[in-house]
Amino acid sequence: MDPCIVDPEAFAQAGLPDARPAAAARTLLPGAVLLSRYACAQSEAIAALIDRIAAAAPFRHFETPLRGARMSAAMTNCGEWGWTADRRGYQYCARDPDTGRPWPAMPRAFSDLAEAAARAAGFEAFHPNVCLINRYAIGARMGMHQDKGEPDLRQPIVSVSLGCPVIFQLGGMTRSEPAQRVLLEHGDVFVFGGPSRLRYHGVLPLRAGADPLFGAQRINLTFRHAQ
Ligand code: MD3
Ligand code: FE
């Protein structure tokens, strides 16, 4: 075998971290830029920070407006603001409604990663003040939706995927337009801004798997600028 070609299986078997280089930024649609494996090298540090955040602001399943069904992804936040949902609607809150306390501060490692990824995707001056943390167990999903609750739509959203892979659906500006399917794997960072900022999107139910760091789970961090 060509020694220059890194075989991920060989890395996994040797118990070594996967040292494949990040792929170059791939623009899937204008303003939708996938930075494959961009966060891999930091994933253990991120996992430890998520544990600290969740100890102060535990993961919970929000109720959705109108029907009051619980969302299948468990969520928490860090940053100045946090994304919340209840029967009245969706809103950014400065305090965790479950504890009454402010959300844990956003670790510098998080904001540095999100800002660097935004810059690598062509978005200068991204100022995230929310990191919504979504945790998916096997079977959990997120239906097609738009993220339009943030007043400054010039600011992109940066998504970091960790743990088990999932099929992400990238749709159009209306619910009925067909969606493109993209596999999101551990360490992938996806930046959505400009003309893609209001695209419909969602993820299919998580399929059974076992990630060495996260087990049978997927974590997604979405960095936003709210308020
Ligand atoms: C495209 N989360 O938290 S991340 C969400 O995998 C959300 O947990 C999904 O959708 C997840 O709102 C998808 C990718 C993502 C996030 C925000 C977007 C894609 C986006 C905003 C605009 C367009
Ligand atoms: Fe979303």
Image (cartoon, grey):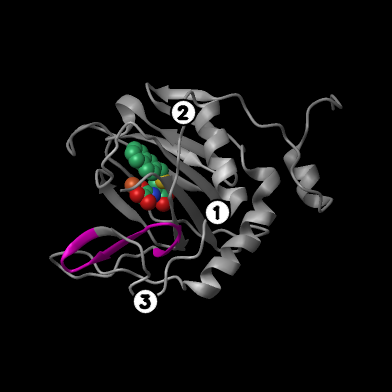
Displayed-image quarter of ligand 1? top left
Q: Where is residue 70 in the image (x, y as percent from the top left)?
A: 28, 70
Based on the picture, tell me whether residue 84 belongs to the magenta stretch: yes
Disc 1/disc 3 C-alpha distance (Å): 32 Å
Residue at image position (36%, 77%) is: 98
For this rendering, which residue is in front, 102 or 64?
102
Lateral position of residue 55 relative to residue 8, left or right:
left
Lateral position of residue 169 relative to residue 46, left or right:
left
Q: Hey, what amino acid is under mark 3?
A: Gly
Q: Is mark 2 on a helix, strand or loop?
A: strand
Residue at image position (37%, 31%) is: 193
On residue 164, the disc is 1
Above or below: residue 82 compared with residue 32: below
* Segment colored magenta: 74-90
On residue 33, the disc is 2
For this rendering, which residue is in front, 192 or 184?
192
Q: Quadrant of residue 213?
A: bottom right
Q: Earlier in the sequence, mark 2 or mark 1?
A: 2
Q: How many marks?
A: 3
Q: Which of marks 2 and 3 is nearer the N terminus?
A: 2
Determine whether label 2 and label 3 are within 8 Å by CB.
Answer: no
Front label number (2 vs 3): 3
Based on the picture, tell me whether residue 218 belongs to the magenta stretch: no
On residue 118, the disc is none
CB of mark 1 near ligand 1 (< 8 Å): no
Q: Hey, what amino acid is under mark 2?
A: Val
Q: Position of residue 120 (x, y in %)?
A: 55, 27
**Is there any visible trace of residue 203 in the rendered image?**
no
Disc 2/disc 1 C-alpha distance (Å): 21 Å
